[in-house]
Each structure stands twice: as C-alpha cells, then as structure tokens.
Image: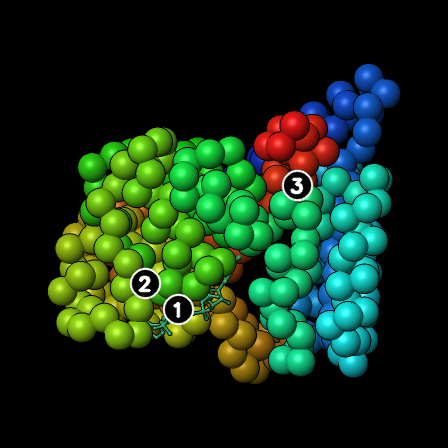
Amino acid sequence: MTTILNGKLISQQIQDELFIEVNKIKAAGGKVPHLAAILVGDDGASETYIAAKIKACEKAGFKSTLIRLPITVNEKELLIKIEDLNNDEDVDGYIVQLPLPRHIREHKIIETISPKKDVDGFHPQNVGRMALNLPSYIPATPFGILQLLERNNINTTGKHCVVLGRSHIVGAPISILLSRNGVPGNCTVTLCHSRTENLIEHTRKADILIVALGKPEFVTAEMVKEGVIIIDVGITRIASDKTKSGFKLVGDVNYEAVAPKSSFITPVPGGIGPMTIASLLVNTLKASKKEIYG
Ligand code: NAP
C-alpha cells in the first residue's frame, strides 16, 4: 500500500500551531515574530516563492517585510541593506531570495547575514553547527523533510538513505542531518551527484530515496526497490496548455510509475514545497524567541 506524504496538510497543521503560539505571545504582550525578505530583480519563480512565504507569514500572524531591489543593484548596495537588517532590532530573521544576479557574489552575501538572523540556515556558522549537531538554524527544505518524516512517524534509524543531488541548500545538508545521531536520523547515507557511477545500483538499494536534481521525472520505476520511501524535492516549471498560468510543476520522480512501488511518496506540488515554507516560519519563531543563540 502506498501512503502519500501530504506536505500541504502537514504544513497547514504547523502553521495553525504557529498561529496559536503567536496569539499567546501577543496576549502576553510579547513581540510578534518578524520575517524580512530581500528580493533582487523580478524572476517569475522567485516572485512566486516569496509571495507564498509572505502569505504564510500573514496566515500564521507573523509580521513580514518585503524589500525589493532592482536587478541592477550592486553588491555594495545589497551589503548595506543586509547590514541594516542585521542592526534592525524589530527584524527577528530574514532571507535573501536566491538565485542572485551573477554580478553579486552569493557567498559574500550569505557570510554577511548575521548567523542569529539567518533563518535560511545558509551561513557557514549555522552549517558548521548543524554538522556538529549543535543548535542551529536548519535550512528550510531539509528541515521540512525532517518534519514530514517525523510527523508521519517514519522510523529512519538503521535505514539506508540515498540522496540524489549535493546542493548546499538541499542534498548536502539533508545527507548530514539524516546521518546524525538523532531522530529523525541514524541513517546510513549515500550521497550521489552527476559524477556518480552506476547510479541505479545505488538508488535500487535505497530504503529512503531523496531526490533534489531539478531533472523532471528523472527517477523511474526500475531505479527503485519495492517499499521505498520517496521524497521528491524537485520542482521544475514546464509549459502546459492545460493550466491557466501556462505552466505546471513537475518533480524529479516519475510519480505515476514510482508510486505503486513505494510505501510512502511525496507529490509535486503539495509535498516538500509547502513544508519548506512552514519550516522557514518555525525558524523565524525560534529567532524571535532567541532559542538558538540566546
Ligand atoms: P542544484 O543546485 O540545481 O543541483 C543539482 C544537483 O543534482 C547537483 O548536485 C548535481 O550534481 C546533481 N545532478 C545533476 N544531474 C545529475 C544526474 N544525472 N545524476 C546525479 N546527480 C545529478 O540543486 P537544488 O538547488 O537542490 O535544486 C534541485 C531541485 O530541487 C530543483 O528542481 C529545485 O527547484 C528544487 N528545490 C525545491 C525546493 C522546495 O522547496 N521544494 C527547495 C529547493 C530546491 P553536481 O553537483 O555534480 O553538479
């Protein structure tokens, strides 16, 4: 039997819980969590992601601020904005929506974000603390995967987890998190990438297969074993004449073919995407309560 891991539903549950907690904070005269976001340029996908994050803030009772900067902004100007946010006591946490234009060095921007306000968990200090199993902001997408596994009571201990893709925002951190001594965790992890040889030999051994490639429907039925748990992180917009927007979202897994062999599977859309947003809000609440750095 295949169980669909309904990220949309779990994300809504988390946001409802956050709403209750924020109302309690407000009633006690405390500070409403405040998330800020910087958006450079007007890339369609980035606009969609930011809009979803702002909407989620509103629904959970958080304060949000969107700072729009033109695509022509230079690195120095962006760094000044970041320092402003680092020093703004009302802002608990903030994100810089990626990707940035090529004339801006992404690592320079990330390193300038105060680790205390780095609710995306991309700053080297948070990445290092995560690897050492110390309290840190966990990047939103891997955090969303952990919460989805946990809230569906999926036992990961002793399982062989194969991760496809080694990006800094998904593949690499989830491979560290699931190999940590903790719950969820305690997996034996194999991390695959474009130079991996005989990929299918690895994917067929996976008890849990996490796919973050950006290659629509890459994983086919023959690549997985019976009973596998599938976490499909991929989101690619492809043209469609069946939708109003003119495009549809497709995951990295051929859902129709792979679902019958899976014990659990995330859909796209409605799987990891909404979990990512909920996790960003959880990180922002932690920032406002100064849970990580005191
Ligand atoms: P990315 O930076 O685009 O990198 C892709 C990774 O896939 C790289 O590590 C690459 O290997 C690997 N790869 C490419 N072709 C491969 C192949 N044939 N076999 C094995 N590995 C291969 O990754 P990302 O930023 O994590 O994004 C991946 C997907 O997840 C995208 O569709 C993105 O939109 C989606 N995403 C979704 C969410 C969400 O909230 N649901 C969040 C973030 C990303 P090399 O390192 O060797 O190049």
Q: Earlier in the sequence, mark 2 or mark 1?
A: 2
Does the image show residue 59? no
For label 2, the residue is 164
Q: Position of residue 252 (x, y in %)?
A: 38, 67
Q: Nearer the viewer, mark 3 or mark 2?
A: 3
Residue drawn at x 82%, y 17% as measured from the top left: 28
Is 83 in front, or is 69?
A: 83
Q: Is residue 273 above or below residue 249?
A: above
For label 1, the residue is 213
The amino acid type found where label 2 is placed reads Leu
The amino acid type found where label 3 is placed reads Lys
Distance CA(mark 3)–CA(mark 2): 30 Å
Q: Position of residue 79 (x, y in %)?
A: 75, 63
Q: Is residue 144 above or below residue 22?
A: below
Does the image show residue 229? yes
Distance CA(mark 3)–CA(mark 1): 30 Å
In the image, ligand 1 is in what quadrant? Answer: bottom left
For label 3, the residue is 116
Answer few, some or many: residues within 10 Å of disc 2's Cα (few below 14, many 20 plus, some between 14 and 19): many
Answer few, some or many: residues within 10 Å of disc 1's Cα (few below 14, many 20 plus, some between 14 and 19): many
Answer few, some or many: residues within 10 Å of disc 3's Cα (few below 14, many 20 plus, some between 14 and 19): many
The amino acid type found where label 1 is placed reads Leu
Q: Earlier in the sequence, mark 3 or mark 1?
A: 3
Q: Give yes or no for contact between labels 2 and 1 (Cβ–Cβ under 8 Å).
A: yes
Decide if ligand 1 comes within 8 Å of the CB at mark 1: yes
Q: Position of residue 183 (x, y in %)?
A: 36, 31
Decide if ligand 1 comes within 8 Å of the CB at mark 2: yes
Position of residue 80 in the picture relative to residue 290 (left or right): right
